[in-house]
Amino acid sequence: MPYILFEVPLCLCRWIDGFSPYVKLYIRGKLKLTKAEQGELLRHTVDTVGKVGQPGEQIQKVISVGMLSEGWDAKTVTHIMGLRAFSSQLLCEQVVGRGLRRTSYELNPETGLFDPEYVNIFGVPFTFLPHEGGQDGPPPPPTPKTAVEPDPTKAQYAIRWPNVVRIDRVFQPALKLDWARVRPLELDAAQIAQVAELAPVLEGKPDVTRINRIELERLAREFRTQRIIFETARNVFDQMKHTWQGSREVLLAQLVKIVEQFIATNRINISPPLFYQDDLRRRLIITLNMSRVVQHVWEAIRQENTERLTPVFDRDHPIRATGDMRTWYTGKPCERTRKSHINVCVYDSTWEASDAFVLDDSDSVAAWVKNDHLAFEILYVYRGVVRKYRPDFLIRMKNGDMLVLETKGQDNEQDKVKRLYLDEWTQAVNAHRGFGKWHAAVVRNPGEIRDVLMRHGTS
């Protein structure tokens, strides 16, 4: 049902035509109401929303002012009516923005573009864009074309997987790093902003006449090398302390020593060389890339000092399966599948279409599914933020092994972090010994998938 948003409080005298005859007679009988009378009429109208013959008969939904200005989101808004005074143009923009959520992101196959969608706005003095509308109202959203859902006749191709929410690590009591095995951290000074210009904001716009210039080198003077070491060690400590079984003071002391050695060695490469030679600028680049330094040290420690991996499963849904997927709809290209529990495979690229054909045709594959709306996710940390990684395919081989397959042409730094966490996931699940044997693989060229399937199908 489409929603009509009302901002309250309101002055009903200015909007007589939109209400029931009962309300019209009430207002016309006394054109000027006191604030108490207006409030009483408003309460009576809200109390009778949707009731035939009552003041609120024509109103379907009433939503408070806070809902329109504090991050509330709905994609089915078709009308917005402002029934109060607006004190600033910024508030008008916020209210109008509530109607600018698209209801559909499916491309029109004929034009290759999104179909137009409209919102009717009344009583909001928003003058930046012309009002667009017609007598017939906004067009309905495009009808989805294909239902994507599990096929009950292909239950033999169902795939199950453990729903891992996190992986606990048991670390060695004495941390150590082989610096020859730790890959260098590459930092490019040319890609880092070193000057900032700040200006006060008035009515939602920066006042460019009052810009203050800040040299970020002041930050480097404040962050001495010892402070950088302690800040980095503290951030790594925050990620390790939950699973550390020994003294936390001992852990922090070991981390400080490791970070100190890391920054002092040649494991940080800064380009151009000018920044590497000048101590002040070197500290500046390291300070501005603190999250990358922390991530780098944390990964090195995890790789070399883990004794055991323990997967922790979701308490309510410890095991997920293809049959749990809810029906969803798409207008993207798709094709019927033979060895997948899901009725169709939706193609996001010609590469995926080629891989799907090989998976259906390969003698090494017993069942497969594209990881789309399946909730198979691997949590990973990148630059201090927890993110979700969704590999492309889940495959059950003829020999019973499971394969997590990703298609990727060229890796960036974030992709490499994803791979590390995927390898950690497979190691933890295999160590559990309750879900069979799992493998992870990456296909970097469209024709490489056959070799990957053959290699894992005979292992």
Image: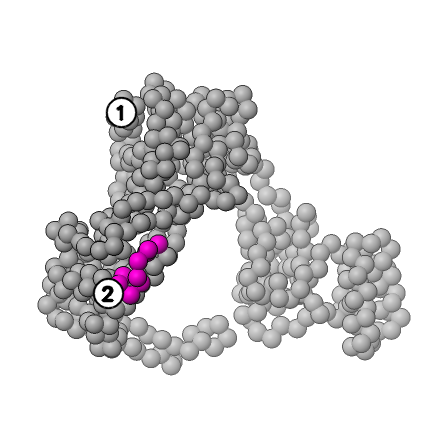
Which residue is disc 2 drawn over?
Answer: 253
In this rendering, would 370 be left or right of 67?
left
The C terminus is located in which quarter? top left
Say which of 205 and 448 sits in front.
448
Which residue is disc 1 drawn over?
Answer: 459
Task: Give the image location of residue 213, x and y in percent.
Answer: 30, 78
Task: Give the image location of residue 271, x and y in percent.
Answer: 15, 61
Q: Identify the magenta region.
A: 243-251
Q: Amino acid at mark 2?
A: Ala
In this rendering, would 326 be left or right of 454?
right
In percent of the image, x 87 and y 73: which residue is there?
Answer: 30
Q: Residue 354's quadrant in the figure?
A: top left
**Residue 418 is one of the magenta-drawn residues:** no
User: How far is mark 1 from mark 2, CA to CA?
Assistant: 44 Å
Q: Is residue 223 above or below residue 98?
A: below
Q: Amino acid at mark 1?
A: Ser
Q: Which is closer to the viewer, label 1 or label 2?
A: 2
**Residue 348 visible in the shown view:** yes
Q: Residue 291's quadrant in the figure?
A: bottom left
Say which of 123 and 327 sits in front.
327
In percent of the image, x 62 and y 44: which residue is there?
Answer: 140
Q: Is residue 30 above or below residue 440?
A: below
